[in-house]
Structures are given as structure tokens and as C-alpha cells.
Image (cartoon, rainbow, N blue to C red):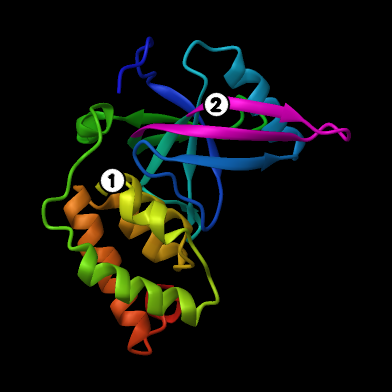
Amino acid sequence: MRFRFDLPARIPLFPLTGAVLMPRGRIPLHVFEPRYLQMLDDALRTDHRLIGLIQPEGEGLAAIGCAGRVVAFSETDDGRQMISLLAVSRFRLTEVQEGFTPYLTAEVDWSSFARDLKGPEDDPGLDRDTLFPLLRRYMDAHELSTDWDAAAEAQDEALINSLSMVLPFSSGDRQALLESPTLADRRELLQGLIEFALHGGDTEDRLQ
């Protein structure tokens, strides 16, 4: 994936519990707080249009988030914004900065995630004949539905990353999925979480 801008040393942060953005993923967000409307306005004035999506953790923030480029936005009648972020790269926080803007900004390090800037990853170890029956049981248990034909045809990365973003895992589990170094690592963790849940595990109690 190539972008016509350099990754900046500092980006605005959008802390949001339970929301993660995976490499090359896309996420819709509803922006309505004045400080984040200001953040969006400021981001749109830059050439990169990046916003760092990151989860709160304890009294602070998670160490790793993912920056997305604003690729679509529309204003509602009452002044709120519906936006879409396209993932560019994960980042590691180095220094959170407060007071310069109504929202948080941070100095970030991109160096650990050079793979995020390349094309989609493949996962030769992905066995859909094993994963899909587990996934079907999990989704039935949670009264969820999906387009199984589309899932069967999806690329490895699109399938694993979309499941990691949308399945109702705990915030801690979502963060662990985000931090997985490779797609194969993420798929192994994802499948383990599904199996754990099917055996009566409670990921929310386990990780939070």
C-alpha cells in the first residue's frame, strides 16, 4: 500500500474503548464531541489526514494503536460527522502531549510496523475447513450472522482482520489481536479465543 505522504512524527489521538483498526482495515466512526470535531477539522487540513485510533488502558492509553486516514466523511443535520478511517499503519506511543489542542496528540514510533505499509499478508496456515465450523458455532451462540459465501471468497487478511475487528471480544482481547506481529499470529490467537469461548471461557473476566 503506497501513500503520497510521509508518516508524521506526531498525530492526533482518538481514544475509544473496544475499537481497534487492523492493518488495511476500514472502520466507520461517529464523531460528535466538540474536541473531536476540532480534531477532525485539523486532520483534514493536513496532507496525511491521519487519526490515531487507540484504546484506553488503566489510567492511560494502550502502548500500541493504529493510524487511519480519513477517506470519507459526511455531516449530519445536527453538525455531527460520520467518518471512515482506512488503516495506514500501527504505531507505538512514545510521548502523549496534552494542552496544545483540545484533544490528545502524541509522538509516535512507526518503525516496528514496516510490514503494515506493504501489500496484504497471506496466511498459508489458515484452514478454513477448521475455522468456519468453529466460527459458525460461535456466531450462533452470540446470535450473529454473516455472509458465508463472501467469507469463503475473502482474502486471508481481509477475513482474519475483519473478524478480529467485529467479533464481540473484550477490549484486552482486541488489543492482543491488534498487537499480533503477523497475520498468522493473529489467526492463531483469534481461533484460540473462539475455542476458549466455546468451551465456556469468559474473555472479559480473564483479561480485564
Whole-percent x and y of residue 139? Answer: 46, 73
Q: Which residue is farthest right?
A: 78
Q: CA distance from mark 1 to mark 2?
A: 21 Å
Q: Residue at (21%, 35%) from the top-left corner?
A: 112
Image spot of residue 107 (x, y percent) = 40, 28
- In the picture, the quarter occupied by the C terminus is bottom left
Q: Amino acid at mark 1?
A: Glu
The residue located at (70%, 26%) in the rendering is 38
* Circle 1 residue: 157
Q: Nearer the viewer, residue 112 or 61?
A: 112
Helix, strand or loop at label 1? It is: helix
Tag 2: amino acid: Val
Measuring from the top left, give residue 130's x and y in whole percent: 21, 71
Residue 97 makes an appearance in the image: no
Q: Is residue 144 visible?
A: yes
Apparent side of residue 152 relative to residue 30 in the rendered image (left or right) = left
Q: Is residue 122 magenta?
A: no
Residue at numbered disc 2: 70
Give 18 or 150, whichever is nearer the viewer.
150
Which of pointers 1 and 2 lies earlier in the amino acid sequence?
2
Most common SS among magenta residues? strand
> Which corner quadrant of the image does residue 4 belong to?
top left
Q: Position of residue 46 (x, y in %)?
A: 54, 12
Residue at left 37%, top 81%?
A: 197
Residue neighbourhood size for the residue with mark 2, other residues' Cα within 10 Å, grouped as few (<14), some (14–19), many (≥20) = many
Q: Which residues are magenta?
A: 69-89
